[in-house]
Image (cartoon, coloured by chain):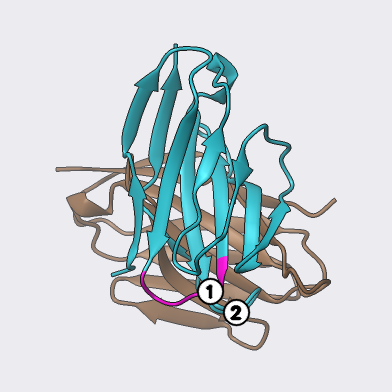
Chain colours: A cyan, B brown
Amino acid sequence: EADIYQTPRYLVIGTGKKITLECSQTMGHDKMYWYQQDPGMELHLIHYSYGVNSTEKGDLSSESTVSRIRTEHFPLTLESARPSHTSQYLCASSEVTSGGELFFGEGSRLTVL
Amino acid sequence: KNQVEQSPQSLIILEGKNCTLQCNYTVSPFSNLRWYKQDTGRGPVSLTIMTFSENTKSNGRYTATLDADTKQSSLHITASQLSDSASYICVVSDRGSTLGRLYFGRGTQLTVWP
């Protein structure tokens, strides 16, 4: 079982609020990722990190930001949430870039009213 | 454009029956192909990872096949159980960059009825 944790699992907030989705892993993986997933659609990469102080934007443009101050922690922040940000956000980690297994957290379901 | 197409989009079977899910891809160059199981409201869990040289790989009642020439893969589930109800996602990785980009299919939603 993967040791990667996301909080909160569910969040309902009003427009304009600032939110932070937490992601932590205890496997010592250097690589961490944030994906966005809407119902019936494929996962889209929005952010990734190859190590401490390394963050890059993914394929899907996102107004969110991330930070990687510690190896085990990769939080995602939305400064001002909007209804268009309503989605499932999945955090993942891996050891090797393309060949290694990807371990996912349970996801954070965000609803912005 | 690199793509991963899965079929069928959804499938309903009776408990105990077998089923096969399909994945066609156009990703090139090819590094590996993965099948994930995603329960509703949960994160995906890896079932198998197959490289170019592997034709078949099993994980319990799950058997994945890969034909790298035709760029097709299948996931066969034997003696289905109610707990197999989930979305099954095919993911293909390229080796064209250090990122090793992952291409996700939209998944096949499997429902197993008692």
Q: Is there CB contact under 8 Å for labels 2 and 1?
A: no
From the viewer's perspective, tell me whether residue B54 is left or right of residue B47: right
Q: Chain of mark 2?
A: A
Splitting the image into 4 quarters, where does residue A44 fall?
Answer: top right
Mark 1 crowd level (few <14, some 14–19, many ≥20, 10 Å Cα): some
Q: Which residues are magenta?
A: A26-31
**Most common secondary structure along the magenta stretch:** loop
From the viewer's perspective, tell me whether residue A17 is left or right of residue B69: left
Q: Vertical placement of A112 versus B75: above or below?
A: above
Residue A18 in percent (x, y) is at 50, 26
From the viewer's perspective, tell me whether residue A71 is left or right of residue A97: left
**Which amino acid does the dot numbered 1 rest on?**
Thr
Q: Vertical placement of B79 versus A83: above or below?
A: below
Disc on res. A96:
2
Mark 2 crowd level (few <14, some 14–19, many ≥20, 10 Å Cα): some
Q: CA distance from mark 2 to mark 1?
A: 23 Å
Residue B96 in percent (x, y) is at 83, 72
- In the image, what residue occupies the spot 78% across and 59% down? B26
Question: Between residues A82 and B39, which one lies in front from this camera angle?
Answer: A82
- In the image, what residue occupies the spot 32% across and 47% down? B39
Mark 1 = which residue? B65
Label 1 sits on a secondary structure element that is strand
- In the image, what residue occupies the spot 82% across and 71% down? B97
Residue B53 in percent (x, y) is at 65, 88
Label 2 sits on a secondary structure element that is loop
**Which amino acid does the dot numbered 2 rest on?**
Val
- In the image, what residue occupies the spot 74% across and 47% down? A59
Residue A39 appears in view: no
Q: Chain of mark 1?
A: B
Image quarter of the C terminus of chain B: top left
